[in-house]
Image (cartoon, rainbow, N blue to C red):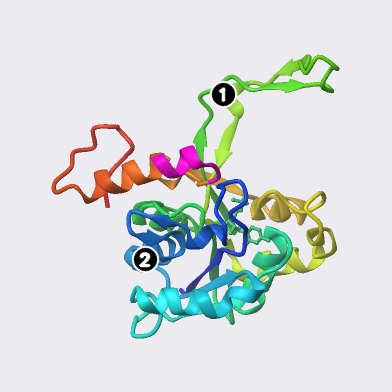
Amino acid sequence: MRVVAVIAAAGSGTRLGAPGPKALVDLAGEPLIVHAVRAMRDSEVVDAVVVTAPHQQVPDFVSVLRGHGMLGGLAMPVSVVPGGVTRQASVRAGLDAAGSSDFVLIHDAARPLTPASLIRRVVAALQAGHRAVVPALPVTDTIKRVGARAKDGTEPIAGTLDRTALRAMQTPQGFALDAIRHAHHVFAASGQEETTAAPDDAYLAEAAGIDVVVVPGDQRALKITRPFDLLLAEFLANQDAADGAADVFGLGERS
Ligand code: C5P
């Protein structure tokens, strides 16, 4: 069964304090997008990759990927297309360029250390018959809802959620390609503004009435948003590179 991956990489590096696109920020000597494409290749279950880049920077992404051996000459073809104004719009552009396939993995370039084992876990659940699969982790913090911020800057607690029933979503999220493409087309209008765009692709699948299931996520698939995340990822990447490094942090199996 054919699997394509769409990697959303058209975001800015604003929250990271980066001058250019976040996906071109360096992590352990290579841009985030290079790590993300390599993870797909290393999983050995992905047949082709579509990367969405900021409109003006498509040629930059092509040359960065080519320069790091991730475009051209791979058994897995990689293409770069312009993204959109929101992540949802970018993913839609990627889906439109993905050709025909049984399954699609929709992934964030901002999760560069996603292990191959996690990618394979999502694909295995698709192959087992699920049409929408999300990797997720249990929530360790207590999560409360808050009300409107008061003049003194404090926020009143409005309720406490049952932590045992909560999961934090990661990517890649896997789908039957035709089903998620249809959902993206139906909800395309709301994807044109950040305030109405979907927080993830599973949200659109849910809204389209598709059953979504969770498989175990992996802490190494952390999303790089702020400078602290990049520091942590740098540490983990170096840890991974260390010869014969033991899993001293209990982050899961190495592969
Ligand atoms: O901003 P955030 O980290 O939540 O974005 C998640 C992913 O979506 C990132 O990999 C980013 O590059 C991508 N994105 C995109 N197009 C946008 C905004 C974000 O592809 N317009």
Which residue in the protein does label 2 denote? 38
Describe residue 15's horizontal placement relative to residue 190 as left or right.
Answer: left
Residue reaching furthest bottom? 73
Q: Is residue 61 visible?
A: yes
Which mark sits nearer the N-terminus, 1 or 2?
A: 2
Describe residue 80's horizontal placement relative to residue 187 as left or right.
Answer: left
Disc 1 vs disc 2: which is toward the camera?
Answer: 2
Which of these two is toward me, 65 or 87? 65
On screen, residue 185 above or below 204: below
159 part of magenta stretch: no
Residue for point 43% across, 81% down: 77
Image quadrant of ligand 1 equals bottom right
Q: Which residues are magenta?
A: 225-231
228 part of magenta stretch: yes
Which residue in the protein does label 1 denote? 164
Describe residue 253's horizontal placement relative to residue 225 as left or right.
Answer: left
The amino acid at mark 1 is Thr
Q: Image quarter for residue 112?
A: bottom left
Pointer 1 residue Cβ closer than 8 Å to ligand 1: no
